[in-house]
Image: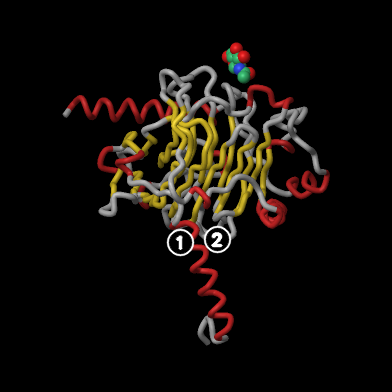
């Protein structure tokens, strides 16, 4: 039996495929050189011939990563990503915004983090938000995905406005963080750069560090494509002069969640969310003020192993970033 023995179903599938690919193709995609710089990893970062796709490798020597040339205040940021295949425990692939370099004490951050994969287990993705140095209040959520993200490219996007942050997977919103009075300065509000990295997160990534990177399976390859930087670029010094991107294709940039999307989001969260900081009473005796507690959700999340976040989480990650950029500086100067 073929997949599509029914001609009308086949026609419908073709139509859906055309619509889906059209919408991601029409996003304002720029080449790597136009929008990004290498961050670390030397040869482990490879720009493909089309100038728009990037391969990031992790091996025994180093991970790799890139960063946007500009800082942005608000916008829509997106990438199609194909994650490393096979055994990837401890391997972290991150797609995120941050200004930790400029504001080490009170930085902002918006994260997508892929936390590695053990054979036979589901993939995990984590989202998180920090504002004005609120690193003592992690706002992590974790989810399973409804597909194998190493099998094909999928689109991961961040919409950041003055009033909300929306995380998307394949155009389905999976999380909305609304700016609320009681969150105070914890909502990201200063210009940030966009980053994509792959690195060794053995100490915390997969089940809280239970499964480390096994370099027998290296190199680990994360493929990035369809990179979208669609926001208001600001001058890093003045930070006032905004240069907002009004290029063609901006009609494909979402401005909020539609009613249909909201239903999809609720379905996703009911089925795929495995952790929310709002229900972690080991970390927070009292849930952070923006949390709206839903007893059914609390009950549902109780069955999942609430891998606690040790002190090591932030430290390890900071250490990683520092050590890798230092390593690349050392390598560059030794040449
Ligand atoms: C951010 O934190 C600093 C102290 O580190 C504080 O002075 C400032 O008011 C905070 N900003 C907001 C928007 O809360």
Where is mark 2, residue-wise?
147
Q: Is mark 2 within 8 Å of ligand 1?
A: no
Question: What residue appears at the point 45 percent right and 24 percent down from the top-left corner?
Answer: 241
Q: Quick check: 241 above or below 166?
A: above
| Left or right: where 17 falls relative to 294 | left
Where is mark 1, residue-wise?
151
Disc 2 element: loop
Disc 1 element: loop
Q: Residues within 10 Å of mark 2 (few under 14, many from 20)?
A: few
| Left or right: where 329 falls relative to 68 | left
Q: Quick check: 162 above or below 273?
A: above
Q: Residue most toward the right?
A: 295
Q: Position of residue 142 (x, y in %)?
A: 62, 45
Of 211 and 1, the residue lying toward us: 1
The span from disc 2 to disc 1 (Cα, nearest Å) is 8 Å
Q: Are marks 2 and 1 in contact (CB under 8 Å)?
A: yes
Q: Residue most toward the left?
A: 335
Ligand 1 shown in quarter: top right
| Left or right: where 131 falls relative to 51 | right
Of 210 and 314, the residue lying toward us: 314
Of 300 and 165, the residue lying toward us: 165
Q: Position of residue 29 (x, y in %)?
A: 40, 49
Of 28 and 57, the residue lying toward us: 28
Question: What residue appears at the point 57 percent right and 56 percent down from the top-left corner?
Answer: 122
């Amino acid at each position: 039996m073929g997949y599509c023995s029914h001609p009308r179903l086949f026609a419908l599938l073709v139509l859906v495929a055309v619509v889906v690919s059209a919408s991601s193709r029409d996003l304002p995609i720029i080449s790597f050189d136009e929008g990004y710089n290498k961050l670390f990893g030397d040869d482990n970062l490879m720009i493909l011939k089309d100038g728009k796709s990037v391969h990031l490798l992790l091996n025994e020597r180093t991970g790799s990563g890139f960063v946007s040339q500009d800082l942005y205040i608000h916008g829509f940021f997106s990438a199609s990503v194909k994650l490393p295949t096979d055994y990837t425990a401890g391997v972290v692939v991150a797609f995120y915004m941050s200004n930790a370099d400029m504001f080490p004490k009170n930085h902002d951050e918006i994260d997508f983090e892929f936390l590695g994969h053990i054979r036979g287990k589901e993939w995990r993705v984590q989202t998180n938000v920090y504002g004005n140095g609120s690193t003592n209040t992690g706002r992590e959520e974790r989810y399973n995905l409804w597909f194998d993200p190493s099998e094909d490219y999928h689109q991961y996007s961040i919409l950041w406005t003055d009033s909300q942050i929306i995380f998307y997977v394949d155009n389905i919103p999976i999380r909305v963080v609304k700016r609320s009075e009681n969150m105070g300065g914890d909502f990201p509000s200063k210009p940030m750069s966009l980053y994509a990295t792959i690195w060794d997160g053995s100490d915390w990534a997969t089940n809280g560090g239970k499964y480390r990177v096994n370099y027998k399976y290296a190199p680990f390859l994360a493929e990035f494509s369809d990179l979208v930087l669609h926001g208001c670029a600001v001058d890093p010094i003045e930070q006032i002069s905004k240069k907002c991107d009004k290029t063609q294709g901006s009609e494909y940039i979402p401005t909020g969640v539609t009613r249909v999307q909201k239903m999809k989001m609720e379905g996703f969260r009911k089925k795929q969310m495995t952790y929310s900081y709002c229900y972690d009473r080991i970390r927070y005796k009292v849930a952070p003020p923006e949390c709206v507690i839903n007893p059914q959700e609390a009950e549902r999340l109780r069955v999942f192993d609430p891998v606690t976040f040790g002190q090591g989480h932030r430290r390890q990650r900071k250490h990683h970033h520092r050590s890798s950029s230092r390593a690349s500086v050392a390598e560059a100067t030794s040449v």
